[in-house]
Image: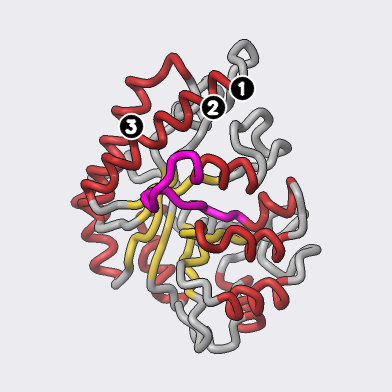
Amino acid sequence: MTTDHGLRFCANLGRLFGEVPFEERFDAAAEAGFSAVEYASPYGRSPVELRRRLKDAGLRQVLFNSPVGAPGTPTAAGTACLPDRVGEFRDGITRALDYAVELECPLVHLRAGVRPADVPRDTAFSRYVANVAWAGQLAAGAGVRLVIEAVNARDIPGYFLQTQEQAAGVVAAVGGDQVGLLFDIYHCQMSQGDVSTRLEEFLPSIAHIQVADVPGRAEPGSGEIAWDFVFDRLRALGYPGWIGCEYRPANATADGLGWLTRYAPEWNG
């Protein structure tokens, strides 16, 4: 959905419309006024099925994540920083890019993983940068861009990237434009604060933004973040990408979408 100032919002189907089964959330998102979606994992379904659901609902897929391990395992948050998981990482990226091509999805979020306590940070960093660079080259051949995200340590203790500066440092180390930032405003506020300054500082590298309020990770407007200021700043900066609604609705999803009208008045969902 687009405002007259160019801000575009996509529905995260892993978070929104939980009142209905996943397969029905495509239609629910379209009926609510969204024209694009994101979600973490497409891998439990065939790309043919997902492509059909997108087409039938008139939606675009704009982001999903690279594969991760099962909950509670060492790879539950990704494998990119793990020196002993290179083969698993590469297999996962190959699979992700196959899906991205089938779904015509422009962005894949490459999950970094949690660094094991017995692996020095320098060792993990070297492996992570090498893996991201390798994946970026492969993605370029598929016409896909990778994004990496800083995640706050309270939600995922030990996640390899915890600040925007760390993530931006990896983008700089890899070089080129095949890897960008996924700037999650919720995680930034939880880890560091000073959201608008960091948005401006890192805007040239930002390929995707996600939103949720603090505390609680519910709808924008439910917590402490000054969303009117943040969205006005994004308009002034000319941010051209999608803004993913990756929050937990406090109540029924449709009942909580009023924040879009409040902060993006031209939204007509």
Residue 240 falls within the magenta-colored stretch: no
The tag earlier along the polypeptide, 3 or 1, is: 3
Q: Are marks 1 and 2 in contact (CB under 8 Å)?
A: yes
Percent coordinates x, y for residue 23 in the rendering: 35, 55
In percent of the image, x 50 and y 57: which residue is there?
205
Q: Amino acid at mark 1?
A: Arg
Residue 177 falls within the magenta-colored stretch: yes
Residue on which disc 1 sits: 121
3 left or right, relative to 263? left
**C-alpha span from label 3 to label 1:** 23 Å
Secondary-structure class at tag 3:
helix
Residue on which disc 2 sits: 125
Between residues 208 and 223, which one lies in front from this camera angle?
208
Between residues 115 and 252, which one lies in front from this camera angle?
115
Residue on which disc 3 sits: 92
Figure check: 77 above or below 12: above
Magenta region: which residues?
Answer: 172-184
Percent coordinates x, y for residue 63 in the rendering: 40, 55
Percent coordinates x, y for residue 89 in the rendering: 37, 27
Q: Amino acid at mark 2?
A: Phe
**C-alpha span from label 1 to label 2:** 6 Å
Q: Which mark is residue 95?
A: none
